Amino acid sequence: MAHTFIALICAPVPVGHRVEVLVLVESSGGFRKTETTRTVVSDLDTGVVYGEMEAFEAVTSIRAEPRPLPPAPRADLAVKTRVTGRVRACQVATMGFTDRWIQTTLVIE
């Protein structure tokens, strides 16, 4: 069965590579609880890990500067989805008009 993942990360994984996709959940707030998902894609053939910075460390400032991040996702995030398989299709696209962002679509079997 094929799984399609769409995430706002740049993850140009070659077709045919084995991957693990984690969809992690970050809960926040008190009375009005909110859940934010964070996607991490691990290319099991190369060892390259793709994801949002918030998946690797808690963000305490709106100022983002280049810096080393931990190699593994945060332990305090709950795993919502974990899929391991082979990439059948990968698309990385620049989205938006005025504000631009990167989106990756992976089809995994």
Image: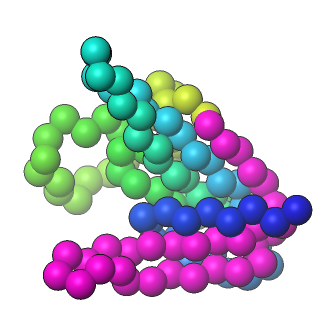
Q: Is residue 18 visible?
A: no
Looking at the image, which is closer to me, 83 or 75?
83
- Indicate the position of residue 87 as horizontal and vertical percent values: 75, 73
Q: Is residue 20 visible?
A: yes
21, above or below 104, in the image: above
The part of the image, by quadrant, that contains residue 17 is bottom right
Q: Residue at x 19, y 35 (%)?
A: 60
- Indicate the position of residue 91 as horizontal and vertical percent values: 57, 82
- Indicate the position of residue 85 as horizontal and vertical percent values: 81, 61
Instruction: Please state the extent of the stretch shown in magenta in the rendering.
Output: 80-109
77, above or below 45, in the image: above
The part of the image, by quadrant, that contains residue 24 is top right
- Colouring method of the image: rainbow
Q: Residue at x 13, y 47 (%)?
A: 62
- The quadrant the C terminus occupies is bottom right
For residue 8, side relative to residue 21 (left or right): left
Q: Main secondary structure of the magenta part?
A: strand
Q: Residue furthest front?
A: 32
- Indicate the position of residue 92 as horizontal and vertical percent values: 50, 81
- The quadrant the N terminus occupies is bottom right
Q: Is residue 91 magenta?
A: yes
For residue 35, side relative to residue 7 (left or right): left
Q: Residue furthest right?
A: 1
